[in-house]
Structures are given as structure tokens and as C-alpha cells.
């Protein structure tokens, strides 16, 4: 199973970016999908998560600015980031909790990360 992120880059404060993450390989089912981020010198933190049914949860720091969504047919999760701030600068990682086969245990898979840099 691979999770491949795309969409990171450099943007000015107040701007927008849209991250995508596609899961591929042998996948039986995907439960939660989400985004975490890690800024330099800081611990990795949850940004947003979405269940297979579409229920979402956000970190307080991004509520009202970021929107998480998913396309279950494409095994893809998105993060629309608006009104970006310099403090949003971080490497963003996607994650998926999934089963590879009907008998396999459910576990978390991670992408390689994509850098988002917000300039002031």
C-alpha cells in the first residue's frame, strides 16, 4: 500500500493550497483518513480527519480555514487550505486506517509528506 501526497508548495499569507493524497495497492477497505503536520522543531500534530461516512474533525487552529474531504471511489483524501498563515508552515502527512484484505488487521499507513511554506 502506498499513500502519495501532492499539492504542497510556497504560498503567500492569505493564499490557498489544496493537498491531495491517493492510496494505492491492495486495499480491502479504508476507515478514517486524515492529515497531520510537523513544523520544524515541533511534534507532529493532527490537522483534520474524516471518517468513511464523511464525519470530520479539525484542530482548533485550522477550523474555519481548512476543509477535509474524500473520494471513496478513488481512495483519495483532500485538504483545502484557505487563509493560510506563516504558522501553517510544515510538512503535511496524510494517513489512512485501512485493511489490505478481509482477514488482515486494520492498521495505519502514512504518506511521505509534502512541504507547505507560507511566507509573510
Image (tube, grey):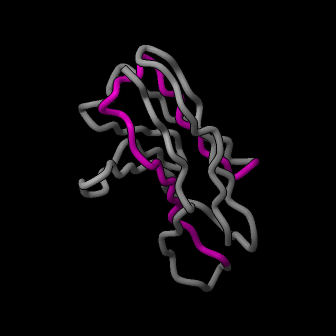
Q: Is residue 72 above or below residue 2?
A: above
User: Residue 87: image x %, image y %?
Assistant: 30, 32
Q: Is 74 on the left or on the right of 19, as rendered?
A: right
**Residue pictured at 48% horizontal, 70% vertical:** 108
Where residue 117 sits in the image (x, y, percent)?
46, 35
Q: Quadrant of the C terminus?
A: top left
Residue appearing at x 53%, y 35% in the figure: 79
**Left or right, 96 with reference to 61:** right
From the viewer's perspective, tell me whether residue 37 is left or right of residue 1: left
Q: Residue at x 51, y 45 (%)?
A: 115
State which quadrant residue 2 falls in.
bottom right
Q: Please say if 42 is above or below 106.
A: above
Queried whether the magenta region covers residue 36, the answer comes back as no
- Where residue 43 appears, x then y in whole percent? 25, 57
**Image quadrant containing the N terminus:** bottom right
User: How many marks do you count on the picture?
Assistant: 0
| Residue closer to the observer: 72 or 61 | 61
Q: Nearer the viewer, residue 113 or 46?
A: 113
Residue sitting at the far bottom: 103
Which residue occupies the foreground of this view, 38 or 94?
38
Name the one closer to the observer, 55 or 60. 60
**Which span is picked out in magenta?**
74-100
Q: Is residue 88 magenta?
A: yes
Where residue 99 sits, quadrant-wise, is bottom right
Residue 20 point in image, percent of width and height: 63, 42
Amino acid at each position: 500500500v502506498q499513500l502519495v501526497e501532492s499539492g504542497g508548495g510556497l504560498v503567500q499569507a492569505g493564499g490557498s493550497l489544496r493537498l491531495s493524497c491517493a492510496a494505492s495497492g491492495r486495499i480491502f477497505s479504508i476507515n478514517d483518513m486524515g492529515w497531520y503536520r510537523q513544523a520544524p522543531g515541533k511534534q507532529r500534530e493532527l490537522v483534520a480527519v474524516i471518517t468513511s461516512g464523511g464525519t470530520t474533525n479539525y484542530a482548533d487552529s485550522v477550523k474555519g480555514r481548512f476543509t477535509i474531504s474524500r473520494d471513496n471511489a478513488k481512495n483519495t483524501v483532500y485538504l483545502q487550505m484557505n487563509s493560510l498563515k506563516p504558522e501553517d508552515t510544515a510538512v503535511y502527512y496524510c494517513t489512512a486506517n485501512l485493511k489490505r484484505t478481509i482477514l488482515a488487521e486494520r492498521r495505519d499507513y502514512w504518506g511521505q509528506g509534502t512541504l507547505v511554506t507560507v511566507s509573510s
